[in-house]
Image (cartoon, rainbow, N blue to C red):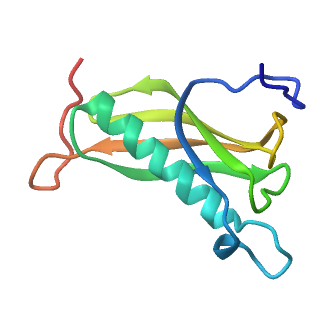
Amino acid sequence: MTEKTDTDAPKGELTLRTLAMPGDTNAAGDIFGGWVMAQMDLASGIRGAEVAGGRVVTAAVNEMSFAMPVKVGDTLCVYTEIERIGRTSMVMRIEAWAQRYLSHVMEKVTDASFVMVALDTAGKPTPIPR
C-alpha cells in the first residue's frame, strides 16, 4: 500500500513514471520545474494519442503552480484524466506526484489543465473519433 501525505489520492490514470536524475537539477539541487512540465506534456501526448487514435499536439497549458520540489532520486508519477472531448480537441487534467526516494511516500507536486488538438497527416485539426 502506498502512503500518501496529501489528503487526496491521485486522480486519473497512471500514464508515466520516470526517475528524477542529477542532470535535471537547478543550482539548488531541486529538479527543474520545466522538466516536470515536460514529463506532464509527454503523458498528455501519450493519453491524447490513445484517445484520438493518432497524432495530437499541445495547444495550451492552463494554470500550473508547484506545491513542493521534486528531488533527485524521486520517482515522478504523472496521472491523466480526460475532462472533456470536443470535435478536434480535448481537455485533460494532469497531476504530477513525487514518490519520495526509497519510500512509499507520495506527495502531489503540481497539476494543470492541458488542451490537446488532434491532427491529420497534413498537420490540420481533425475530428476525434467517438
Camera-nearest residue between 6 and 106: 106
Badge count: 0
Residue furthest toward the left? 122
Camera-nearest residue between 116 and 105: 105
Query: Could you say where residue 108 lies in the image, as x and y percent from the top left?
Result: 78, 39
Q: Is residue 13 left or right of residue 59?
A: right
Query: Could you say where residue 114 lies in the image, as x and y percent from the top left?
Result: 51, 43
Q: Is 23 located above or below residue 38 in the figure?
A: below
Q: Tell me which residue sits at (64%, 57%) in the image.
A: 36
Q: Is 25 located above or below residue 20 in the figure?
A: below
Residue furthest toward the bottom? 27
Query: Could you say where residue 77 lies in the image, as x and y percent from the top left?
Result: 64, 41
Q: Tell me which residue sits at (60%, 57%) in the image.
A: 37
Q: Tell me which residue sits at (40%, 33%) in the image.
A: 90
Give the position of the C terminus as an image quadrant: top left
Query: Could you say where residue 117 lies in the image, as x and y percent from the top left?
Result: 32, 44
Q: Tell me which residue sits at (84%, 28%) in the image.
A: 4
Query: Which quadrant of the structure image shows residue 107?
Result: top right
Q: Is residue 111 left or right of residue 102?
A: left
Give the position of the N terminus as an image quadrant: top right
Q: Is 72 located above or below residue 19 in the figure?
A: below
Q: Is residue 49 left or right of residue 100?
A: left
